[in-house]
Image (cartoon, rainbow, N blue to C red):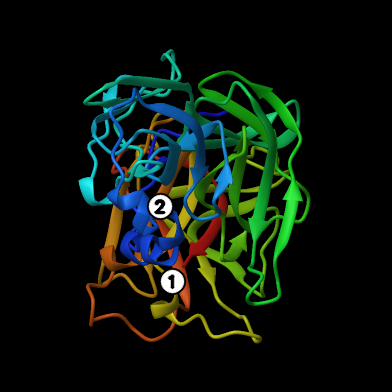
Amino acid sequence: MKKYSRNRVNFRYAAFIVALTLISACSNEFNQSDLSSESTEPPMITSVADATENSTVQTGVLGNLYYIKGENLATTTSIKYNGFDAGFNPTLVTNNTIISQIPLGAPYINASNKLTVETLYGVAEADFSLLTITDFDEGLVDGVNAVTLNGGDFTDADQVLFVSGSEDDGNLVEREARIINKTASAITVEVPDGVIQAFIHVFVNGAIAQSTSYGFNYPIFTDELINGWELGGWDGTQELSTEVALGSTSIRRESLSWGGLTFVSNDMTEDLVIADYSAINFQIYPANSETIRVACALNDFDVQVELDLVPGEWNSFSIPLTDFYPPGTAPELITRIDFQEFSAGTAPFLFYVDQVGLIE
């Protein structure tokens, strides 16, 4: 599998910004008799439930909210996940329930897999592992398109889904992925047929970790030009090739100094409104030592983004469209994308381009 060395997709789950709304909606967890009761007995943890679904889980996702359920919890002084102090809001603690958020910094690999609650009258522990997806890599594994999700703890992962659309919009599609390999810190799956854009869900002991967006909201080139786009260029030649990052086909570009490869929009079905998208994604493989830099331009060359390349490997890029046009200065439509040779060395320059598309 080729390792991308530029702008890998990195993320951690952020806190629920709707926490107060969720707590209000689940106020039945905090009845008045429970709020007023306080026991001097040692605490007990009977279960942990996902706060959004109120479903019992044995694994928690970093950044998410959970109900810690049990007895004698009202005098809680400390909550720890794998020894990492979670902090808590005393107003969200009753004798039988605590609402707790798993800290993003809690360890999830080679850890004790313990949830610990300490009160004025004792300590309670429960088996509870943690889960997160930190980033993912794309590539070919044994000839198939694959994604490796990094993070953990994936030891007990039993299902991976590529999910697109939504129930509310009536276009929800869930495609199950074949698990190729898994360790505690990484899980590799085959990309299901038909996926253009999706979020990847990893299931572990009732918990679900979700990746950022995989694929494109608007593909331009994967194994072929899509949506009526056309290919051109100047001071060089371009042709299809089997040197790929994913799939079966890429674009090979041999160029003279300052020559360029051009994608021109000829989509008769959809206007590409620049405000509808946030970034352009693509991968470039510099095939000789002279090819160390290209410039990417959107619509024209008034503003272009220079990209340093590492020869001999696929370089993955995700460029915010605001890098081309600051807010308020962008044209209405995207009509053209250029990759201009910018190495300033000795020609010929040779690079491959693959997996080009736009992200919302």
* Amino acid beneath label 1: Tyr
* Amino acid at circle 2: Ser
- Percent across and percent down for residue 5 are 40, 33
- Percent x, y of residue 77: 21, 31
Coordinates of residue 333 in the picture (x, y in percent): 43, 83
Q: Quadrant of residue 164?
A: bottom right
Residue for badge 1: 277
Viewer can see residue 313: no
CA–CA distance between discs 2 and 1? 12 Å
Q: Counting other residues with Cα less than 10 Å from the Cα at mark 1, is it few (<14), some (14-19), or many (20 or more)?
A: some
Q: In which quarter of the image is residue 344?
A: top left
Q: Can residue 244 be seen in this view?
A: yes
Q: Looking at the picture, tell me which residue is in the foreground, 236 or 58.
A: 58
Q: Is residue 35 above or below residue 287?
A: below
The residue nearer to you, when weighing 312 against 175, is 175
N-terminal of the pair, mark 2 or mark 1, is 1
Q: Nearer the viewer, residue 61 or 253?
A: 61
Position of 240 with respect to 103 (left or right) is right
Q: Which mark is residue 299?
A: none
Q: Which residue is drawn at 31% across and 37% down?
A: 103
Name the disc covering residue 318, or none: 2
